[in-house]
Image (tube, rainbow, N blue to C red):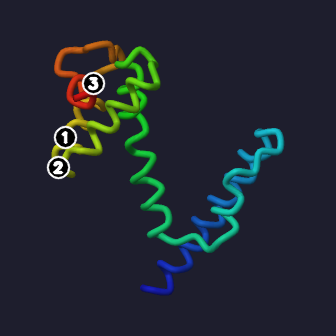
């Protein structure tokens, strides 16, 4: 059973590398992820990437709620960083579920005042 999973994982990782090569070809020479794919792929490496990218939409929503004002966004992110892990994840979850209109949507959080203090 373990051998079968290993072969399956090898096939999946090979397909991932092929997909990356195809995508990279459309980037006009950009090679920013080559080191990631050149090293051995493993589940831990992929999970760390997924954990990072899963929160990108929340930060995009936060930036939109700040009218794309980067200094205000950075202050808000500083406010998030000051929260404990549970509160930070709750706040990011609220941002993820605030809908497409991030400009003070009902239930959306505002960290600007907290972060500026």
How many labels, in total? 3
Disc marking residue 90: 1
Report the quarter where the C terminus lies.
Answer: top left
Q: Nearer the viewer, mark 1 or mark 3?
A: 3
Horizontally, is 100 left or right of 24 in the view?
left
Nearest to the observer: residue 77 or residue 33: 77
Residue 99 screen position, x and y as percent: 30, 21
Q: Horizontal and vertical percent for residue 34?
A: 71, 58
| Image point (17%, 49%), residue name | 86
Percent coordinates x, y for residue 45 in the rendering: 49, 66
Residue that badge 2 annotates: 86
Q: Give the left or right position of residue 44, taking residue 30 as reference.
A: left
Q: CA distance from mark 1 to mark 3?
A: 16 Å
Front-most of residues 7 and 67:
67
Q: CA distance from mark 2 to mark 3?
A: 19 Å
What whole-number distance in Å separates the C-alpha atoms at marks 1 and 2? 6 Å
**Helix, strand or loop at mark 1:** helix
> What is the secondary structure assignment of the residue under circle 2?
helix
First-in-chain label (1 vs 3): 1
Q: Position of residue 69 (x, y in %)?
A: 44, 19
What residue lies at 43% left-to-right and 61% top-to-bottom?
47
Q: Residues within 10 Å of mark 1 (few under 14, many from 20)?
A: few
């Amino acid at each position: 059973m373990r051998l079968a999973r290993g072969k399956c994982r090898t096939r999946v990782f090979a397909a991932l590398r092929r997909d990356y090569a195809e995508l990279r070809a459309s980037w006009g020479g950009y090679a920013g992820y080559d080191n990631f794919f050149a090293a051995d792929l493993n589940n831990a490496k992929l999970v760390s990437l997924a954990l990072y990218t899963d929160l990108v939409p929340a930060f995009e929503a936060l930036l939109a709620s700040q009218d794309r004002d980067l200094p205000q966004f950075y202050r808000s992110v500083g406010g998030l960083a000051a929260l404990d892990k549970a509160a930070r994840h709750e706040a990011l979850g609220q941002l993820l579920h605030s809908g497409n209109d991030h400009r003070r949507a009902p239930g959306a959080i505002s960290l600007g005042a907290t972060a500026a203090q």
